[in-house]
Image (cartoon, grey):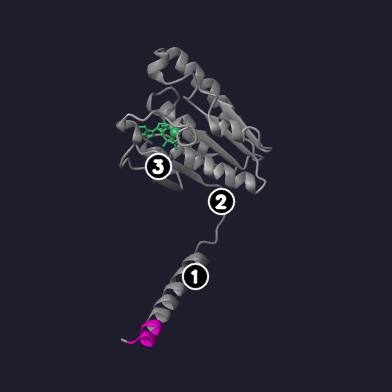
Amino acid sequence: MNEHEQEARHKARMARKKALIDAAIARADQEKGLLVVLTGNGKGKSSSAFGMVARALGHGMKVGVCQFIKSRTDTGEEAFFSRQPGCEWHVLGEGFTWDTQDRARDIAAAERGWAIAERMLSDPSYQLVVLDELTYLLSYHYLDSDRVLDTLAHRPEMQHVVVTGRGASEALIELADTVTEMRDVKHAYRAGIKAQAGIDL
Ligand code: ATP
Ligand code: MG
């Protein structure tokens, strides 16, 4: 095959591919608020959620972020995003459950945090709501799963929600529109590197 034939063949193949892609794009013509779940053991769940926060703010959308579990308020994401107009940021945790070692206190913190999330999930002016590490409140039974799923299911129609955390339940996955499982291939922590500013916090 000479160069000319090779080019013609490539052009024909790309034209077929373009027709398929254009047809698929044309088929996806609906709009709705999405429930995105980012789960799995690999790194990247929360940082992906914060990427969507940046996108939404770039479009001038109003964003609410609830960080459950976590108690540290010295993260780069909070320092940056809580200063952005249109972004409401709540750090609602009391720390990891192995740090607090106090189930009643964890449940009280979960309830306080969920009340703030519930307010956002009933207010259509929030166009994106991030519920960071929400899955742990469900897997530890700090919150009633049916109640949480019911609130998510009945939120404003055009509101996007991103839920992060390991071990997303089948019911949450079922309710979601988009689910990604981060797979842990390698993590610097296991080589003795502590959490690094700019990468991990
Ligand atoms: P990130 O916030 O970096 O996107 P994540 O939300 O996917 O991470 P979490 O389970 O919330 O992961 O953990 C947060 C912290 O733990 C981050 O410092 C992250 O780098 C670290 N981490 C995430 N996955 C692992 C892992 N498999 N092993 C060790 N540390 C991890
Ligand atoms: Mg996280």
Rendered residue at 67%/40% (across/down): 125
- Give above or below for 33 relative to 24: above
Rendered residue at 45%/31% (across/down): 133
Rendered residue at 51%/19% (across/down): 109
Q: From this viewpoint, is residue 120 visible? A: no
Image coordinates of residue 159 in percent, x first then y, are 59, 43
- Secondary-structure class at tag 1: helix
Kindly identify which residue carries mark 1.
22
Query: What's under tag 1, amino acid-wise?
Result: Asp
Query: What's under tag 2, amino acid-wise?
Result: Lys
Kindly identify which residue carries mark 3.
173
Frontmost of labels 2 and 1 is: 1
Image coordinates of residue 199 in percent, x first then y, are 46, 37
Circles 3 and 1, Cβ within 8 Å, touching? The answer is: no
Instruction: Tell whether position 161 is magenta.
Output: no
Figure quadrant of residue 182: top left
> Callout 2: few (<14), some (14-19), or many (20+) C-alpha neighbours within 10 Å?
few
**Cα–Cα gap, marks 2 and 1:** 21 Å
Tell me which segment is drawn in magenta: 2-8
The quadrant where ligand 1 appears is top left
Q: Earlier in the sequence, mark 3 or mark 1?
A: 1
**Cα–Cα gap, marks 3 and 2:** 17 Å
